[in-house]
Image (tube, rainbow, N blue to C red):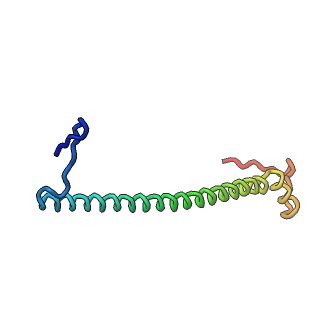
Amino acid sequence: MTARVAGKTMVTAAIGAGDPAQGRALLWLNVAALLLVLLSCFAVIHSTHATRELYTQLQVLESRQWHLQEDYGRLLLEESTWASHYRVEKVARTELGMAEPDLAHYKVVRR
């Protein structure tokens, strides 16, 4: 529909003047679009929540990994302390009463 107002041409749409079947189809199309928009909103909310939960879990696991690496470093240091040649020799001499044999006590075994 066109109308002339003060020398200008205006184009307007007539609402409800068309076919009632076309109006119902347009209504259902609008309802379907609204449902799709609402569904996508809920999907965004769900994915945001899941992302935050996974990030929290990642932070907990990274913290646990840091503590485990710290413990591993301490254990390596302790192992190197206990296994040092000086300490092994000291324990062998003091606690086990071991001594280095004299050259006179060496025996060579031939095949």
Quadrant in the picture for residue 6: top left
Q: Measured from the top left, where is residue 19 in percent x and y?
A: 11, 58
Identify the residue at image location x=20%, y=55%: 15
Q: Position of residue 68 (x, y in %)?
A: 65, 58
In the depicted view, which residue is nearer to us: 26 or 36?
26
Residue 51 is situated, as x and y percent measured from the top left of the image, at 48, 58
**Quadrant hosting residue 43:** bottom left
- Left or right, 30 with respect to 104, comes to left
Taking the image as shown, residue 98 lies to the left or right of residue 59, namely: right
Residue under the image location 76 percent in, 57 percent down: 78
Q: Nearer the viewer, residue 61 or 55?
A: 55
The extreme front residue here reads: 6
Q: Residue at x 85, y 47 (%)?
A: 103
Report whether 90 appears left or right of 57.
right
Q: Is residue 97 left or right of residue 8?
A: right
Q: Residue furthest top?
A: 7
Q: How many marks?
A: 0
**Where in the figure is residue 60, as x and y percent of width and height?**
60, 61
Furthest residue toward bottom: 95
Residue at image position (73%, 56%) is: 74
Q: Is residue 7 above or below residue 62?
A: above
Location of residue 31 (image quadrant) = bottom left
